Amino acid sequence: MSAQAPQRHALVTGSAGFIGFHLCQRLLADGWQVTGLDGMTPYYDVTLKQRRHALLADHPAFTPVEGMLETPGLVADLAAGRDCLIHLAAQAGVRHSIDAPRSYVTANLIGAHEVLEAARSAKPSHLLIASTSSVYGANTAMPYAERHAADHPLSFYAATKKAGEAMAHSYAHLYSIPTTMFRFFTVYGPWGRPDMALFKFTKAILAGDEIDIYNHGYMRRDFTYVSDLIEGICRLIALPPRAPAGPADNLSPVAPYRIVNIGNGAPVGLMEFVQAVEQATGRPARKRLLPMQPGDVPETWADATLIEALTGPLPRTDIRDGVRRFVDWYRDYYGV
């Protein structure tokens, strides 16, 4: 009888966040031992974060830790002996970064530096860090490909995430840390964030209130269902950057470092998205048409060539199915 493989242990930052919660659930189901760090910051309803963590804590292989990412040495202490480090914690939100930019410096720059220092000392087999499609900024070439320049961010949030990518590349080069950056595209699904469009639309439509439609509805987003995104992350964990994966790859010539889009690869018009919410709720939306907001972009669209070259085809949940699952969760969670 062969010996049983040792249990793998991951450190996940932002484990009480929307994506972090789903990732921890998946890792636990796959047999990982998981330590989850979250600061429980009040950017949105802390109770929602606490309930996510409480569900995870029901699993004996999950260890919850509440603490601020930027606390000197905290991440390094937690990362010691971990097989991989997955950094999802951040101050999110394009519009909030206009009103509270300092919080983005603290979380997305100082906090990211603590993660990089932790990886420097712990030497995990793979460091995986969340970035965002917002870094493409003023780019007009579609779909967005990882090799495209991302030099003109339109929000301070995007600027801090782009800076985090550059910081991670330098550490990958200097200390030979295998590092993969994810650029996420408009992730949605159950347990989602209250500041995002799907949550706001569902809440307003069910209450009979108006919803805000920016750029008069002339917007498209590459909506990515959360379980599809998590599948992509989990496949990439076992693929630290080593060799080029074909002509679409952006593997650094001087470091074990790669940037990977994770998106559905098929943008959906905003009005079509609203129709999906109307269908799922069974109610018409009262729409308030507004101009484009500062820092926003009219369209996002992921080129998924690289991730599929690395991992094979990923699942792509239809927008109507994904929205219905969110609305079902929302009704159940809030008793609507």
Image (spheres, grey):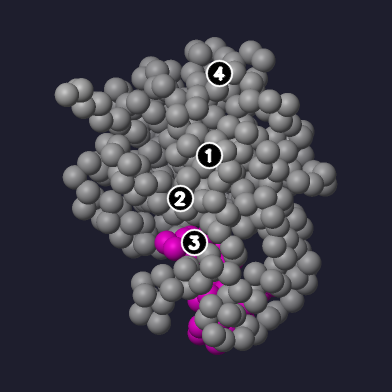
Secondary-structure class at tag 4: loop
Residue to which mark 3 is pinned: 189
User: Residue 140 lies in magenta, yes or no?
Assistant: no
Disc assigned to residue 242: 4
Identify residue type, mark 2. Answer: Ile
Residue to which mark 2 is pinned: 19
Query: Badge 1, how many Cα within 10 Å: few under 14, some, many 20+?
Result: many
Secondary-structure class at tag 1: strand
Identify residue type, mark 1. Answer: Ala
Secondary-structure class at tag 3: loop
Query: Badge 3, how many Cα within 10 Å: few under 14, some, many 20+?
Result: many
The x and y percentages for residue 304 are 66, 42
Cα gap from disc 1 to disc 3, whole angstroms: 18 Å
The x and y percentages for residue 108 are 53, 38
Is 224 left or right of 301, judged from the image as shown? left
Cα gap from disc 2 to disc 3, whole angstroms: 9 Å
The x and y percentages for residue 145 are 73, 38
Q: From this viewpoint, is residue 158 visible?
A: no
Check contact, mark 3 vs mark 4: CB within 8 A: no
Cα gap from disc 1 to disc 2, whole angstroms: 10 Å
Check contact, mark 1 vs mark 2: CB within 8 A: yes
| The C terminus - image quarter | bottom left
Q: Nearer the viewer, mark 1 or mark 4?
A: 4
Q: Which residues are magenta?
A: 187-214
Residue to which mark 1 is pinned: 130
Query: Badge 2, how many Cα within 10 Å: few under 14, some, many 20+?
Result: many
Mark 1 or mark 2: which comes first in sequence? 2
